[in-house]
Amino acid sequence: MAWIRLIRLELARLIRSGGVAAAALLLLGLGVYAGWQGNRRVQAAEAAASAAETAYQDQLAYLSSTYPPTTEAGEPLYYLAFPAPQPPSRLSALASGRTAVETASLRIRLLALEGQLYEHETLNPRLAAAGHLDLAFVLIALLPLFVIAVTYDIVSGERERGTWRMARLFARPRRLIAAKTAARVILAAGLVTSLALIGAFSTRIDADGRAGWAVALVALHTLFWFALCLGVAGGRRSSTANAMILVSVWVTLTFLAPAVLSLTNALLHPVPEALELTVRQRQGYHEAWDLPKAATMEGFFEDYPQWSDQTVPEDEFTWAWYYAMNHRGDQAARDASRAYRDVLTQRDEWARRWSLLVPPLATQIALDRLSSADLHTQLAYQEAVRGYHERLKQHFQPFLFSAAPFTQVDWDRVPTFEPAVPAGDAPQAGLPAAAALILISIGVLLPRIRSRPSPDS
Amino acid sequence: MLGRLYPRAANVGLRNTLLVSRRQIGTMRDDRYVLFLLALVVSLGVVSVLGARHHTASEAEQRARYQALVERQWAEQPDRHPHRVIHYGFLVFREEAPLAFFDPGVGPYAGTSLFLEGHRQNAASFGDARHATGMLRFGRLTPATVLGLLLPLLVVAAGFASVSGERERGTLRLLLAQGATPGQIMGGKVLGIGALALAAALPIGLVTATFAAVGGEGQTSVTRLLALAAGYVAYLTGWVLLTVWVSSRRASSRAALVQLVAIWVALCVAAPRLGASLAATLHPIPSRAQFTAQVEEAQRGVGDSHNPDDPFFSALRDEYLARYEVDSVEELPINWGGVVSREGEEVTSRINEEQRQELLAAHRRQDGVLAWFGLLSPYLAARDLSMAAAGTGTEAVEAFRAQAEAHRYDIIQRLNDLHVHEIRYENDRAQRIARQEWTRFPVFQPNSPSLRRALTDRPQSLTALGLWIVVPLAGLGLGRRQLPRVGVDGSGS
């Protein structure tokens, strides 16, 4: 009972302290704002997805009304951009990861694909360079500062005020520190819970495994900071020394380590293929134009042997040949495109592996994955768009080879985009980070557990 | 040190100030945390110069290589029909400014390759940030980040106890009793901490200057380097003044440290992100899908140059038939197909550009919010000026886009003119322009905006940096009489 009373006393003292209450309210305020903003962002992404759909319908109606019914299907298909909207994950409202720099609602024409996959969003680069605020940032970067602020003088403060000796009359030092820590953990847990609940309600997140893992990771990450703070502040250093050490560690883990790893990653895995594939696709397509048409078709038949009994006239423009030539462009870029994706996959895997050493980074990267907002997801999306483009091509090839008018196309039976499914299940995304967080937490606490705290000198 | 007794008070004042500054330097030299942080900041600064320089150099080399390849491919085209070449188009790769390794600015978030073709205005592809993993969320390691983000923390660590520590040890009263005025004490502290900040910034600056010189950019780089140096000196001076000010107002060093770290977090970590987020909320922009839908919608108003029966183009035909006094387009002395393509390009380009300008205006409104936010966050203002001086700001990306669009329009209309005058209307598609013609086309040579313009376009950031020095300076000046009383009558605890 004495134990609970101690915790209660300490909690009351913490809450009454003006600075602590102000910081907690500030964090809550930022969290509410970030949750609201994230929700707006997801709504904007949903609006973009439906805009892609509407634009397709509008375009289809316009083309159908302007072309004479005898027009070959190949001609309106030249203009028609098919929607490939990837619905945003609700969780990305709270952990937005790379969604700001990525496109999720591409519109794909039947032409060569590689030139259509990589255009930038309409994003303002100036804002992107200033940084990005979401609930994950509040929880991963700012909450630890709150933890530091309430624990850096957990022992040294009492010592410096001269209250340590008196406090010792009520309990043994180890017990006292445990009670004081417990009060702070309860306070932080209250913050995390309220922020998570606010986030969940403001964005209507499903209480599924992914959300559960996200909350667990944030909780473990916060506990890591408590472990670290105790590891540092449980010693005999002065309050100012503790504060400086902890702030330096925070800067190192939250800014320096990610920045150094990011630069290393970029240096280890350069991506010249981005420009290579662009140049190759354009060249492959246009060189095909100067080839005899039979030679162009030859390359096309390598990938589509089912059409190899078809011939196109040499001296006349046909849409079958035109789209085959576009296919030649993608063929020419194929190796570079594969290499490009391989490098990005390597970057993604390298980042996930090395992030495990840096708790905030491990948490961030795992959250990105849980909320389908990481590089891997973007690659999966591009892959899904590739699959869609392929299905569209195969759907329309019969019309092109038979030179059928577009009125013969049953537009309701045109393939629709199948969004990429999130990679891996939730435990797969969260478990390595969780394990790393627990191990590192134990690691930073170990010296403190071994040595008895007797800081009354 | 009984300064007031001496007749030449100015000299004594200076001497007292220098004595205090020497005292502060001595304290910092004995502080192993400060020394550790100093070493950390300097080594990170140097590493970041080397790393970022290597990265930008290899990127620049790639872009130059592919640009040369694209130019060669253009010149080596076979005989082609000009409309073919309109669709063949041209690729341009955005070159980063020579000082991008110091501050990449908005560069990584803007696309690097842009395909220029007829009928369309494409968006750029392949920005650096799209190839980065989620790690980038926390920022990138560049000399600008080291100077703007980390060096202030070093200043805080070195100076939070500068005045409050003297007070706690009782030496502040001793200094005052010996004749040093509060102004001299605080001046000395500012000088001492400033010296440390300079010791940290100088190696980073020298390495940067060396690499910039190796880049061989000459005069422009020198002025840009000087502008960068001036900006960061002002920014760091503000931090030194603020640190001494807060330290002089607090009875305990602990309170001073907590307050300074809180200020650093608010100004350098929270404010920029909050500002960007508010700017995006206040001025929402359409997504790419919505934007292209808008462009298509606007284009439908004039019709399509590929569709010669369009009302716009039939009106055009009547006009040409009347001008040349003939009855059919076949009788025109020029190629009607080329005319349609040329006039169509003019209209679609204008519409595209109008839509683009609307989007860019929304971007500028967002930038405006961020610029005003700079008055709250000197870090934001300092980085804004840093981008301007390094030539990596928004205006550089926009200049590239605008010049690429002008180049696109020029090339496409030259090709259309060839179509109008060199290709006969009859049996149009079978004819070719001889390959020699391709080498006569202009080469894309973008110019980056001038430093003067980049700086004068940022009045808020310049004001913010000025205020960042004036406010703590005024605080120090106004508060100097209270210096002996802080902590005595319960104030400043």
Image (cartoon, helix red, strand yellow):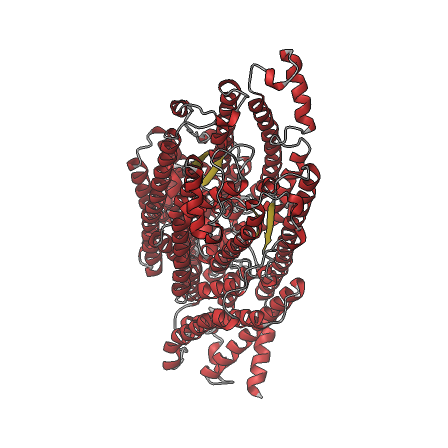
Q: Position of residue A251 (x, y in %)?
A: 43, 59
Foreground of the two, A308 or B371: A308
Q: Quadrant of the C terminus of chain A?
A: bottom left
Q: Position of residue B430 (x, y in %)?
A: 48, 27
Q: Is residue A141 visible?
A: yes
Foreground of the two, A188 or A355: A355
Pick out the residue farthest to the top: B325
Q: Is residue B465 above or below residue A224?
A: above
Q: Position of residue A279 (x, y in %)?
A: 41, 41
Marks counted in the figure total 0
Name the residue at 33% across, 54% down: A268
Q: Is residue A123 visible?
A: no
Name the residue at 51% across, 53% down: A386
Q: Quadrant of residue A442?
A: bottom left
Name the residue at 35% across, 54% down: A269
In the picture provided, is B398 more to the left or to the right than A37? Answer: left
Q: Quadrant of residue B168?
A: bottom left
Foreground of the two, A232 or A140: A140
In the picture provided, is A9 more to the left or to the right than A350? Answer: right
Q: Position of residue B386 (x, y in %)?
A: 44, 40
Q: Quadrant of the N terminus of chain A?
A: bottom right
